Image (tube, grey):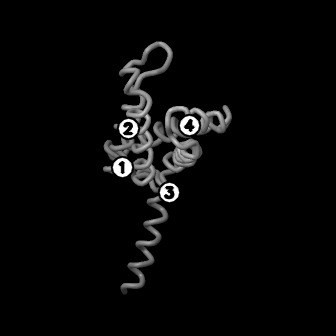
Amino acid sequence: MVNKFEASTLLLRVVLGISFFIHGLVKFQGGIENIAGWFGSIGLPGFLAYAVALIELVGGIMLVIGLFSRVISGLLAVVMVGAIFKVKLAVGFLGNGQMAGYELDLAFLAMAIFIAVNGSKAYAVDQVIFKEQENGRASLAK
């Protein structure tokens, strides 16, 4: 039986994972070269667009299945801090009509930090992998 804390953390992990997966997918579908060019136009190296898109795409899948959730959430938090401070802060919390504000980025940041700090064990692949490793170590210790 999953307790309330783990159930709510699972919900955050899956929603955050799906959201980031879609954001990463859109970057590739819309032409990652365009995103790299835009990164260059705001003073960031173009290759960073590939790194961000991969972190979002692959990291989103890993969050959904619960694989290295704390590490992935930490990486996604760094991406959100970068997005907020480099792009969104100047347009304000709700945006300016031309560009969305940082309200969604801030919500994603809070979710990512929560998962990075607390982890998420319910229905997580990590639990299966590390439980088997723990059982193997316990057998060796006997």
In percent of width and height, residue 102 lies at: 40, 26
C-beta proximity under 8 Å, tags 4 and 3: no
What is the spatial separation of the Cα atoms under label 4 and label 2, in whole angstroms?
A: 24 Å
Q: Nearer the viewer, mark 1 or mark 3?
A: 1
Residue matched to label 4: 40
> For the C terminus, which image quadrant?
bottom left
Residue matched to label 3: 125
N-terminal of the pair, mark 2 or mark 1, is 2
Tag 2's secondary structure?
A: helix
Residue positioned 47% across, 70% down in the render: 132
N-terminal of the pair, mark 4 or mark 3, is 4
Which circle marks residue 116 in the picture?
A: 1
Crowding at dot 3, Cα within 10 Å, few <14 / some 14-19 / many 20+, comes out as some
Residue positioned 48% across, 51% down in the render: 66
N-terminal of the pair, mark 1 or mark 3, is 1
C-beta proximity under 8 Å, tags 1 and 3: no
- Is the residue 80 above or below the residue 115 in the image? above
C-beta proximity under 8 Å, tags 1 and 4: no
N-terminal of the pair, mark 2 or mark 3, is 2
